[in-house]
């Protein structure tokens, strides 16, 4: 089959488009004809070898996929060849206490499919192998490329805002990186939850996109003093929640923007992993720092209900052919993207 893969870590030039072995399903597994995939920053981290990523080589990345089942492994009875499905990236042991209690994100053997698995498991290929419990029916009203984008970013945002931060109607939420895939899902979900999102982004074009996604206010980095504007917009109170997937560069401002008793939820660090914190803010303001990592299958099913109800919409803004994955990753690295980037694998 054709795929995009790399056999060493590095910059964009290590990505190769070529032939790799076809996947063969084992017990409890299925092989999909991948119609479309979607891009995430973990694809870039895998290629770069960050943070401390150890991968089997050659490696096919890609953690989001939509496609048709073409082959089943032994013992699979709950799905059938020809089913149109989407893929949840969490792969776990299925037998530990965490898995049996529906909290597979705490499984010590949990891996992100296409990021921490391999060598040829990922979605940037014509075919992909998955565990059947990773699958859900493709929403019928979505195109293949839109359907590919309702996995990793969506479930991460749901877990951050619903499961971890427990966002309430009327709460004010500062959303960093609001014009990207994760941020644009956050803006949409916050509106559904009845919260008041304040978006932070970098250009006027991206600001207009954030408004379309549901932002009540939009702040431009480099043009606005984010802390001062947050104070102005909240009557000097501060926000209830900071939604962060940017990391190091925004950490000090995030802490300052929180109200007393506020909470900050973080799922990633696209601009650096080594954050600094004046601990006096933490105890004096009695702040809560909440880590969040992707989401459970239950989180995903709950989020998908809003997609099925057409209350959340995949924010896909551009589609690349599989052979041009490097160009898609370049757009992400250079922060030229808005919403989600999808890959046509057909």
Image (cartoon, rainbow, N blue to C red):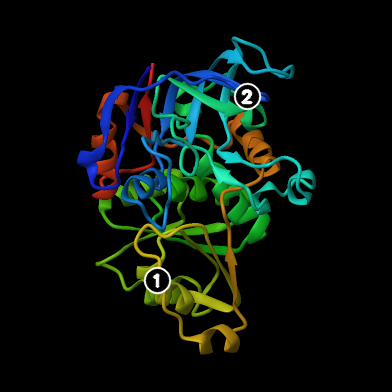
Inter-mark Cα distance, 2 to 1: 38 Å
Instruction: State left or right for residue 94 relative to residue 121.
Output: right
What is the x, y in percent for residue 237?
A: 53, 78
The image quarter containing residue 327 is: top left
What is the x, y in percent for residue 203?
A: 26, 54
Q: Quadrant of the N terminus?
A: top left
Q: Would you say residue 169 is visible in this rendering? A: no
Mark 1 neighbour class, 10 Å CA radius: few under 14, some 14 to 19, many 20 or more: few
Nearer to me, 228 or 116: 116
Pick whichever of labels 2 and 1 is earlier in the sequence.
2
Q: In the rendered view, tell whether residue 168 sits above or below residue 192.
A: below
- Which numbered disc covers residue 274? 1
Q: Nearer the viewer, mark 2 or mark 1?
A: 2
Q: In the rendered view, tell whether residue 88 sits above or below residue 155.
A: above
Q: Quadrant of the C terminus?
A: top left
Residue at x 38% of width, y 46% of height: 46
Q: In the rendered view, tell whether residue 207 sits above or below residue 91.
A: below
What is the x, y in percent for residue 268?
A: 46, 57
Mark 2 neighbour class, 10 Å CA radius: few under 14, some 14 to 19, many 20 or more: many
- Which numbered disc covers residue 29? 2
What is the x, y in percent for residue 344?
A: 36, 22
Residue at x 53% of width, y 19% of height: 24
Residue sitting at the far top: 82
**How many numbered marks, from 0 up?**
2
Nearer to me, 89 or 264: 89
Local secondary structure at mark 1: loop
Instruction: State left or right for residue 56 relative to residue 330.
Output: right
């Amino acid at each position: 089959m054709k795929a995009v893969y790399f056999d060493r870590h590095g910059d964009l030039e290590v990505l190769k488009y070529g032939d790799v072995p076809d996947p063969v399903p084992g017990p409890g597994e299925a092989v999909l004809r991948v119609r479309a995939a979607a891009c995430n920053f973990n694809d870039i981290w895998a290629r770069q070898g960050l943070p401390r990523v150890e991968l089997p080589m050659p490696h096919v990345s890609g953690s989001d996929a939509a496609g048709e089942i073409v082959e089943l492994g032994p013992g699979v009875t709950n799905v059938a060849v020809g089913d149109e499905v989407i893929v949840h990236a969490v792969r776990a042991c299925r037998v530990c206490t965490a898995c049996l209690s529906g909290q597979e994100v705490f499984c010590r053997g949990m891996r992100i499919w296409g990021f921490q698995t391999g060598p040829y498991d990922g979605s940037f290929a014509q075919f992909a192998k998955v565990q059947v419990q990773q699958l859900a029916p493709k929403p019928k009203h979505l195109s293949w490329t839109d359907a590919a984008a309702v996995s990793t970013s969506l479930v991460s945002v749901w877990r951050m805002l619903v499961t971890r931060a427990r966002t309430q109607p009327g709460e004010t939420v500062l959303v960093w990186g609001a014009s990207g895939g994760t941020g644009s899902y956050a803006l949409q979900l916050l509106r559904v939850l009845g919260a008041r999102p304040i978006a932070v982004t970098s250009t006027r074009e991206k600001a207009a996109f954030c408004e379309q996604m549901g932002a009540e206010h939009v702040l431009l980095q480099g043009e606005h003093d984010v802390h001062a504007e947050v104070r102005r917009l909240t009557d000097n109170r501060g926000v209830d929640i900071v939604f962060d997937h940017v990391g190091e560069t925004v950490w000090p401002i995030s802490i300052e923007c929180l109200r007393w008793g506020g909470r900050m939820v973080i799922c990633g660090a696209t601009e650096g992993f080594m954050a600094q914190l004046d601990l006096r803010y933490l105890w004096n303001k009695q702040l809560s720092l909440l880590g969040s990592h992707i989401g459970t299958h239950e989180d995903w099913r709950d989020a998908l209900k809003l997609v099925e109800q057409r209350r959340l919409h995949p924010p896909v803004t551009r589609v690349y052919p599989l052979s041009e994955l490097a160009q898609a990753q370049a757009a992400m690295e250079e922060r030229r993207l808005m919403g989600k980037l999808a890959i046509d694998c057909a």
